[in-house]
Amino acid sequence: MPVASPTLDTIRAIVAEHRHLEGPMLPILHAIQEAFGRIPAEAVPAIAEALNLGKAEVHGVVSFYHDFREAPAGRRVIKLCRAEACQAVGSEALSERVLARLGIDWHGTTADGAVTIEPVYCLGLCACGPAAMVDDTLIGRADAERVLAEAAA
C-alpha cells in the first residue's frame, strides 16, 4: 500500500537500498512505485545521479514500461487486452462498453478515484478472450458487466 507524499530523503533511501543490485534501475523503480503508488518526478534525477545515468535514460525506462505510473492509479485497476487474439473475439466492443460506462478514456481514472483503466497487449488468456484483469484477478471470456462487477464500479 502506497504511503503519503514522497520525500527526497525517502526516495534516496530506497535508491540506496537497491543500487547494489545487478541491474538496479527496475528494482528501484518498482520499490519507489510500491512506496508512493507512482514514480514521482523528483525520483528521476535522484535515480540518475545515484546510477550515474542521464535523467533522459531514467525517464525513458519509466515511460517505456506501462506498469510504471507518473500519477497515482485508482483504488481498482482494470486492464483490458487489446492484442490480436482478443480483438478477434470482441475486445474492441468490450473496451468501448467499459470505457463508456466509466466515462473515461484509456489510462484514465474515474473522478472519484475508484477505477483506472489501462490497455494491455496480452494477458496470456488468448484461448479465453476477450481477456481482462481487475487488480490481480484474471477474467476470461470477459463482458462489460462482469468486468465492472469485479471492479465494483
Image (spheres, helix red, strand yellow):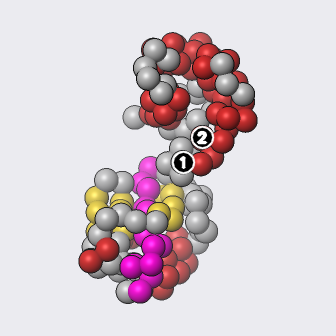
> What is the secondary structure assignment of the residue under circle 1?
loop
- Numbered circle sitting on residue 61: 2
Q: Residue at x 50, y 17 (%)?
A: 19
Q: Position of residue 143 (x, y in %)?
A: 35, 80
Q: Nearer the viewer, residue 24 or 13?
A: 24
Left or right position of 57 against 103: right
Choose top left, top right, bottom left or bottom right for residue 89: bottom left
Q: Amino acid at mark 1?
A: Tyr
Q: Determine crowd level at label 2: few under 14, some 14-19, many 20+ residues with C-alpha closer than 10 A.
A: some
What residue is disc 1 on? 65
Residue 129 part of the magenta-drawn span:
no
Q: Residue at x 40, y 34 (%)?
A: 1
- Numbered circle sitting on residue 39: none
Q: Residue at x 48, y 27 (%)?
A: 23
What are the residue bounds of the magenta stretch? 75-88
Give the alpha-carbon distance from disc 2 to disc 1, as whole Å.
6 Å
Q: Nearer the viewer, residue 85 or 5?
A: 85
Q: Residue at x 63, y 46 (%)?
A: 63
